Amino acid sequence: MKLIAQYLPILDWGRGYSRSALSNDLVAAVIVTIMLIPQSLAYALLAGLPPEAGIYASIFPILLYAIFGTSRALAVGPVAVVSLMTAAAVGQVAEQGSMGYALAALTLAMLSGALLLVMGLLRLGFVANFLSHPVIAGFITASGVLIAASQLKHILGVEIEGHTLIEIGGSLLSRLPEAHLETVAIGIAAMAFLFWVRKGLKPLLVRLGTPRVLAEILTKAGPVGAVVATTLLVWALGLEERRVAIVGSVPQSLPPLTTPSFSPDLIGALLLPAMLISLIGFVESISVAQTLAAKKRERIDPDQELIGLGAANLGAAFTGGYPVTGGFARSVVNFDAGAETPAAGAFTAVGLAIAAVALTPLVFFLPKATLAATIIVAVLSLVDFSILTRTWTYSKADFSAVSVTILLTLGGGVEAGVSAGVILSLLLHLYKTSRPHVAEVGLVPGTQHFRNIQRHEVETRPGLLSLRVDESLYFVNARFLEEFILDRLARDDGLRHVVLMCSAVNEIDYSALETLEAINARLKEQGVGLHLSEVKGPVMDRLKATHFLDDLNGRVFLSQFDAWSALRREGSRPDQQPPSTHDPT
Amino acid sequence: MKLIAQYLPILDWGRGYSRSALSNDLVAAVIVTIMLIPQSLAYALLAGLPPEAGIYASIFPILLYAIFGTSRALAVGPVAVVSLMTAAAVGQVAEQGSMGYALAALTLAMLSGALLLVMGLLRLGFVANFLSHPVIAGFITASGVLIAASQLKHILGVEIEGHTLIEIGGSLLSRLPEAHLETVAIGIAAMAFLFWVRKGLKPLLVRLGTPRVLAEILTKAGPVGAVVATTLLVWALGLEERRVAIVGSVPQSLPPLTTPSFSPDLIGALLLPAMLISLIGFVESISVAQTLAAKKRERIDPDQELIGLGAANLGAAFTGGYPVTGGFARSVVNFDAGAETPAAGAFTAVGLAIAAVALTPLVFFLPKATLAATIIVAVLSLVDFSILTRTWTYSKADFSAVSVTILLTLGGGVEAGVSAGVILSLLLHLYKTSRPHVAEVGLVPGTQHFRNIQRHEVETRPGLLSLRVDESLYFVNARFLEEFILDRLARDDGLRHVVLMCSAVNEIDYSALETLEAINARLKEQGVGLHLSEVKGPVMDRLKATHFLDDLNGRVFLSQFDAWSALRREGSRPDQQPPSTHDPT
């Protein structure tokens, strides 16, 4: 029973569900539903899928997340970046508009869901940490630019191809003369209106005395206004006959039961994209969930979130959707509108189901240019290149990771960009730890504290070399330490004792243990003692399980000051000292 | 001129070349040449190539390494593990015995040479460190088993297929009834003789009064004895007519000028194997070179070694060879025989060239079973499963890396094994650093030293929480620290000051900086001070370039003891203290 409860957070909040929570959740659901209708249609367009796929992807996934997820405000469904990644992945295996394309999107959702679910059951939530903040920021910014560029075709009313900025830009330029005047007029008007709503409407409403929360929500409903106005315009003027592209007929139906493909070839081709989509989707979702939870002092369980998102994606795969995740914009609206529990999400799903059955005829005349305009205005708010200047001043490693991510995302597509960002930031970290900072330290006069002799006025003693290794010792840097000490030994004839101050050594792995044994043997040959100080408890526990301490040509000291005091009898040979090891644990 | 000298170590040792060095090098060259003839033929067999390819791969590569390499004793040529990896890689793109097979082997050598050369010019010698010692040990052991298993077909005189232990074993079992009696007799006799030479000959010779070095060398020449004896046997009894497989006619020629393929398809297919072969070959070679150099207090330059090995492999690609590297057995023989400079290698090349022109008719009747026996006896000395027990007692992470490497090498082949080993050890390291050890510390009475309150008898003060974070702060673990501190804060109402003792923090990357800013903001909201102590110089330099120290709701102390002393006025609110930052640099 406890185990079931662990995997079903709904049992936790569902039991204490109150009447006031119900009314708050209902209000939030109505607001979110109104906002989601145009957004779902728009993101389906971005993913290259028929508009109803966006609606379907917002119904069962929300319900499943409400059962399995831990965030009380997260709204799950199609989001911009994942829609773009879906278009890139599915575009590689099928022609847009074909049956195979929709099938591949379902399969991608299934794979992504299965991966998330397995990661959740294996408690691998920590993998989200493998994306550094600058890499995420750079990726989101570059994706925003790519998405906006890819939507310009709908504003111009032309056909373009490509998944990189260069391809899209080249295609756009060559097709510019074919731009369709009426479409351009609608698209630009919609964009101008939406930008004004975003910047100017809220201050105006507040000045007119509208309560702040209501003003906020009305602002978010801007896209609905644009949708209604341009749909009426097309209908009234018969613009669809003048080649303004419209959404057209959308089936009036609840989400259909669909079956993704289990073809090994297709699964093989989509596996890597599915992994990247899962990773990016999870990172986006968990960031939003944690931000909102912190505001109410609630906790998010990353492993359970994986399960929630996995269930949501599996739901999408079997009900005509495509990969989904927790979206920033919709979650914030949900939160601001007062949602208290995941039940708000369930009510939203009901609202969208009603819309799918009853309202789809109303969007027949909706111009695609309006949907593109809502996407462009939404994603441009994600674009923030300041991460480049901020990392430049702080750390060149972070800067190079973020610039490579941005350049490769723009120039090579979303998958190349995010893969390169993850790999590069990990490699840079490993490279940094492969050449650790090793400081020769001396005593700060009048204290028991030791600092770098090159940065501080400190006391040293001839014949005694104290080295502080500023890194855990493991296979990547083990050889570096060996070379450092042997080089130092070759240059200093009077050396009698080497003390390794291990205050920054958090781990000594097996490779490093072998290296320490080699260093010890070499120093012993030359009659030089090797001592350790400030060895941490967990590291010491492990060393005690080996012969290293028995063979050590020296002692282990609790503190560097103890080592300094004990080894002051300059010239005493280490092998003449008592072999007893001072036990610091 | 200096730049040229940097890339041509030959100018360094060549200038002072003496008559005594010449005679020592000549003696070593004769001994190594005699040993290399059967070995080269055998490894070519292992790689699936005609026997002369092994001889050719030992001529120009040695000469080129003598010009560009830095080790004075390293002998470059075909080695067991790289020959096996070549067979695995080339076997995937061409049929053994076909023209395409030899061409693919040349192409693999070219790619491997180019990769090594580029890595050397980019000074990427440190990548060798990305293979941990246990992973290397496990890989070598599993490869030895695989190689021995793959050679059993020559001992049994049957045809078998496969690159994994399961495939080879299954194939062997099904073909066992077809085993060829005369071949089995030769193979087992040769193996028995070689094992006896290895274990029994040297003690016998030493007892008979042979000088130890000579005894050592005669022992290494054992394979030559087996080759001569079994060749004579086949010739005398006409066993080749009774279907004993023999080497047959080998062209009597100097290495031919060959051209590898530049086909993008072939290069694409061989690129990953070439990377793995380069990495493994480099690691094997540098380990041997450093071991031998240390005995004579010489230094090896890893980056220049990459260039030397790159040149050697390019030489192999254009002279009928296949991928080569510095071999353990041949280098040790060279060293023990008294080689003083790389000129010994050049003389060996001359010796092998003479052999290629003059001696190849003599190996016509050499049975393949004898070559297989020399390989099996040689590689079984590499097999050492004790790495499993040694890592088990020391570190489960190292143990899991080595066991996965062994299992995957045996069950999935060399490429899968070594890739998995590298990736797994890096991921395990990252996983460990993603959940750093955070210790709450207190003052060891009577000292200025702070240790973990759970392991030592220490003093603490109410309201003051001192945390020592035992890891660099970077994107992989940034979130962990935030959750740790906020959890702790939620459980302790009386908290007034949090001191982060940064003695083990070697880096704070941009992600961690953002996290520290978030922690600072949260603590500030609750009226709790955030202080840092023992921040290292390089870390402090970087923090000073940001606003973090200005916004910090507390101070930076040189030592934890300073923080302890200054914050003793319990209950004082951090915002009432002077905002000045104590500058520790």
Image: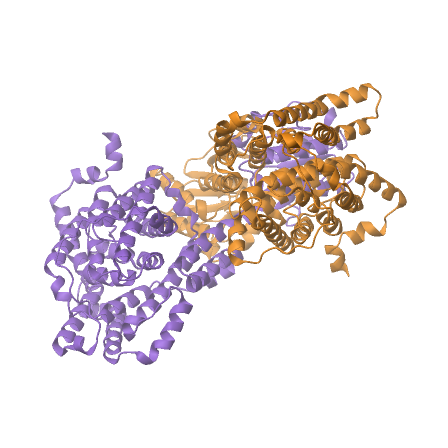
Chain colours: A purple, B orange
- Against A331, is A583 above or below? above
Q: Number of marks in the image?
A: 0
Residue B482 percent across, percent down from the top left = 40, 45
Residue B568 percent across, percent down from the top left = 47, 40
Residue lying at the far left in this picture: please name it: A358
Residue A42 vs residue A14, the one in the foreground: A42
Residue drawn at x 21%, y 52% is A320
Q: Is residue A347 visible?
A: yes
Q: Is residue B340 left or right of residue B382?
A: right
Q: Is residue A317 left or right of residue B443?
A: left
Residue lying at the far right in this picture: please name it: B19
Residue drawn at x 26%, y 56% is A102
Residue A519 percent across, percent down from the top left = 67, 35
Residue A193 percent across, percent down from the top left = 24, 73
Please identify the quadrant where the N terminus of chain B is shown.
Answer: bottom right
Residue A191 vs residue B88, the one in the foreground: B88
Residue drawn at x 47%, y 63% is A389
Residue B504 vs residue B531, the one in the foreground: B504
- Against A68, is A391 above or below? below
Image quarter for residue B394? top right
Residue drawn at x 40%, y 44% is A127
Residue A348 vs residue A99, the one in the foreground: A99
Q: Is residue A534 visible?
A: no
